[in-house]
């Protein structure tokens, strides 16, 4: 029973809600010349190659993209795309932002779609 409790604690230790992710410091904060809709479409298409479909919420001037984990339904990242005077402002919040061994596909997709 003791080992079961230890295992359950370890499994739940990595879980983070969307609210928890949004309150953590951003792992990336960049700007793009693309408008919000073009950037969001590029990002969703790029992420679809490596993950389950992302969840979108927002308006034409701001989008919140919730990226699922590769192995479970918990969110791996939350990406905010907001309208700015010269395109869009992108903020990435990742679940394991301080872990150098975290999956890089989300970060690479954010970078790829900037241009």
Image: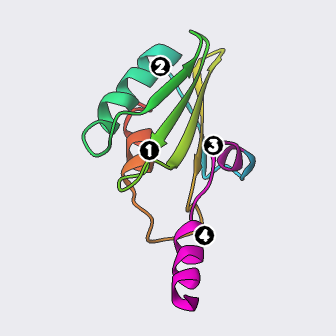
Percent from the top left, x then y, of residue 113? 39, 32
Residue at the spot x=53%, y=46% of the render?
A: 77
Separation of residues labelled 2 and 3 (CA atoms): 25 Å
Q: In the displayed structure, would residue 6 be above or below residue 38?
A: below
Percent from the top left, x then y, of residue 85? 66, 14
Proximity of marks 1 and 3: CB atoms separated by less than 8 Å: no
Majority secondary structure of the magenta segment?
Answer: helix
Residue matched to label 2: 34
The colour scheme used here is rainbow
The dot on residue 68 is 1
**Is 13 contained in the magenta span?**
yes
The nearer-to-camera label among 4 and 1 is: 4
Q: In the displayed structure, would residue 53 be above or below residue 9?
A: above
The nearer-to-camera label among 2 and 4 is: 4
Q: Residues within 10 Å of mark 4 (few under 14, many from 20)?
A: few
Proximity of marks 2 and 3: CB atoms separated by less than 8 Å: no
* Secondary structure under the numbered disc 4 in the rendered image: helix
Mark 2 and mark 3 lie on one chain; the one further toward the N terminus is: 3
The nearer-to-camera label among 1 and 2 is: 1
Residue matched to label 4: 13
Q: Residues within 10 Å of mark 1 (few under 14, many from 20)?
A: some
Judged left or right of residue 70, residue 66 is: right
Which region of the structure is painted magenta? 1-22
Q: Please state which of residues 53 and 12 is positioned toward the viewer in this rendering.
A: 12
Residue at the spot x=65%, y=49% of the render?
A: 21
Percent from the top left, x then y, of residue 107? 45, 49
Separation of residues labelled 2 and 4 (CA atoms): 37 Å
Residue matched to label 3: 18
The single residue placed furthest to the left in the displayed view is: 49
């Amino acid at each position: 029973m003791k080992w079961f409790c230890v295992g359950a604690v370890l499994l739940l230790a990595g879980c983070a809600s969307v609210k928890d992710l949004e309150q953590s410091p951003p792992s990336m904060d960049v700007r793009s010349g693309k408008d919000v809709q073009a950037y969001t479409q590029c990002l969703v298409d790029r992420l679809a190659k490596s993950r389950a479909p992302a969840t979108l919420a927002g308006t034409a001037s701001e989008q919140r993209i919730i990226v699922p984990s590769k192995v479970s339904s918990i969110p791996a990242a939350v990406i905010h795309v907001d309208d700015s005077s010269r395109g869009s402002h992108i903020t990435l919040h990742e679940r394991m932002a301080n872990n150098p061994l975290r999956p890089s596909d989300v970060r690479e997709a954010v970078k790829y779609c900037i241009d």
